[in-house]
Amino acid sequence: MSAEQISNTFQKAMNISGSPNAVSTSPTQSYLSQYFPGGNQQKTSKALKPFSTGDIKILLLENVNLTAINIFKNQGYQVEFYKSSLPEDELIEKIKDVHAIGIRSKTKLTEKILQHAKNLVVIGCFCIGTNQVDLEYAAKSGISVFNSPFSNSRSVAELVIAEIITLARQLGDRSIELHTGTWNKVSSKCWEIRGKTLGIVGYGHIGSQLSVLAEAMGMNVIYYDVVMIMALGNSKQVDTLDELLSKSDFVTLHVPATSETANLLSAPQFAAMKDGAYVINASRGTVVDIAALVQAMKSGKIAGAALDVYPNEPAKNGENLFNNDLNSWAEELTSLRNVILTPHIGGSTEEAQSSIGVEVASSLTKYINEGSSIGAVNFPEVSLRDLDLDQENSVRVLYIHQNVPGVLKTVNNILSNHNIEKQFTDSRGDVAYLMADISQVDLADIKSLYEQLEQTPYKIATRLLY
Ligand SMILES: NC(=O)c1ccc[n+]([C@@H]2O[C@H](COP(=O)([O-])OP(=O)(O)OC[C@H]3O[C@@H](n4cnc5c(N)ncnc54)[C@H](O)[C@@H]3O)[C@@H](O)[C@H]2O)c1
Ligand SMILES: O=C(O)[C@H](O)COP(=O)(O)O
């Protein structure tokens, strides 16, 4: 449903009933409203209240792009916006009330925090990574999570290209020296990148795009990935990480943060690399053992490194990365030469942020207004054509439940009092999601329909759109 359709339908509802929230309008007039008591099944018996888009509350943190704010405001949602992430206690207070939250990579949405999210139905990660969210707990609580899988990939790939040349030519050091007036014209250990080998660990959206750019500059590209992936250009997949490490002049990491990738590069891996190789990490701070990297650089084994991500990153601009006992390597790292440190800016370009804003805000809007979970990262992907608002007394049933036998029989028994126009259901792990458009529903019966569905065993959350 478009925003225009929604606002038109609300307008119609307002004209009829004087309130867009009123349920007891003429049964012959269909309008869009929602029974939407809160998405989290752990919380019981909240007061039922149908509401309009104007009742939807969205909390946006971490300077989510204006494009997203505009999309939400055009829907009539209430938007609360913060430039940074919030301290845990403040986040817990704020999340209690909202239906949707938009974050980037800093905000940790743990089980502890999500337990307080009484009304939350959807989380938008306005970035690629979703490791900051407890995806499983969210799904089991009926909260779907969306991200932007590739809108900033090009920005990261371009940053890495810049870093390869910067490291090869020691540009960071020359610039720092001349900022203090020191003229230091050297060619020793400064290289062209033409003909050098770039080893890409993780050949996904970013790794594969980087591969094309690097080849265009005359580099040989090899890559290692846990799955077999088609090589672009003349690049070649290698069988093991060790093979990649032993052959690469530059090693760059583009894997997600998982238990398998924690400290993927540590002392043994640095030892396996070529003498004088370079390391680049713009993936996640957990992937490189920075203390071991410092030692490998001090010994001369590694000639330079570029880090964009760290194990413990500050919550907002102006804070000191090194004011953290966990970053004990900080002093030694910053005293080394040919080290580029950037504050997690891989995806921070105007182009990427604007397109992420549109993409994620659109996914959230579609989920809130229509129930479509296409593109969700933790949830069964379910969608139907638009609910036919011209068909009298149509209701879209959105029913999230535990994935156990017998649920559909119970639910369809309840729906069978009406005409089921369309139905689609899918499951993912322990969670299943049913979407059904039913007609011939007397609007006076909607509350009872909602309550019957809510009382079914194995229910996680119910919403009715009408
Ligand atoms: N610095 C930034 O600002 C920035 C911006 C965007 C993305 N990222 C991060 O970059 C990483 C990669 O992003 P992407 O979009 O290319 O992801 P992607 O999912 O498209 O690709 C990741 C690849 O890594 C592979 N992989 C997973 N585990 C592996 C392992 N143990 N060894 C080797 N390969 C493995 C996967 O098979 C996949 O091909 C993510 O962690 C993301 O969060 C950082
Ligand atoms: O996961 C991502 O897309 C990157 O790490 C960028 O995160 P950010 O939006 O917090 O800069």
Image: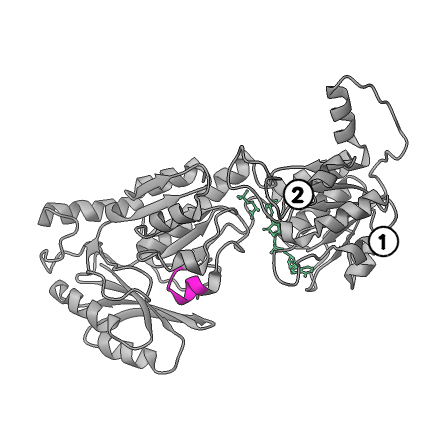
Query: Observer-nearest residue: 100 or 388?
Result: 100
- Confirm or reject: label 2 Cβ below 8 Å from ligand 1: no
The C terminus: image quadrant: bottom left
Q: Nearer the viewer, mark 2 or mark 1?
A: 1
Characterize the local packing of mark 1: few (<14), some (14-19) or many (20 or more) Cα atoms within 10 angstroms: some
Residue 63 lies in the magenta-colored region: no
Q: For numbered disc 1, what is the local secondary structure?
A: helix
The amino acid on which the numbered mark 2 sits, given as a three-letter code, is Ala
Percent position of residue 320, x then y: 58, 36
Residue 152's quadrant in the figure? top right
Can you say whether 347 is above or below 31 in the image?
A: above
Stretch in magenta: 137-143
Query: Which residue is depicted at the point 40% across and 71% down?
Result: 432
Q: For numbered disc 2, what is the local secondary structure?
A: helix
Characterize the local packing of mark 2: few (<14), some (14-19) or many (20 or more) Cα atoms within 10 angstroms: many
The amino acid on which the numbered mark 1 sits, given as a three-letter code, is Lys
Query: Observer-nearest residue: 332 or 6?
Result: 332
Q: Which residue is mark 2?
A: 157
Percent position of residue 10, x then y: 20, 47
Can you say whether 131 is above or below 14 in the image?
A: below
Name the side, left or right, on which 204 lies relative to 56.
right
Q: Which residue is mark 1?
A: 247
Query: Observer-nearest residue: 431 or 43?
Result: 43
C-alpha span from label 2 to label 1: 21 Å
Q: Residue furthest right?
A: 188
> Quarter for ligand 1?
bottom right
- Residue 241 visible from this viewpoint: yes
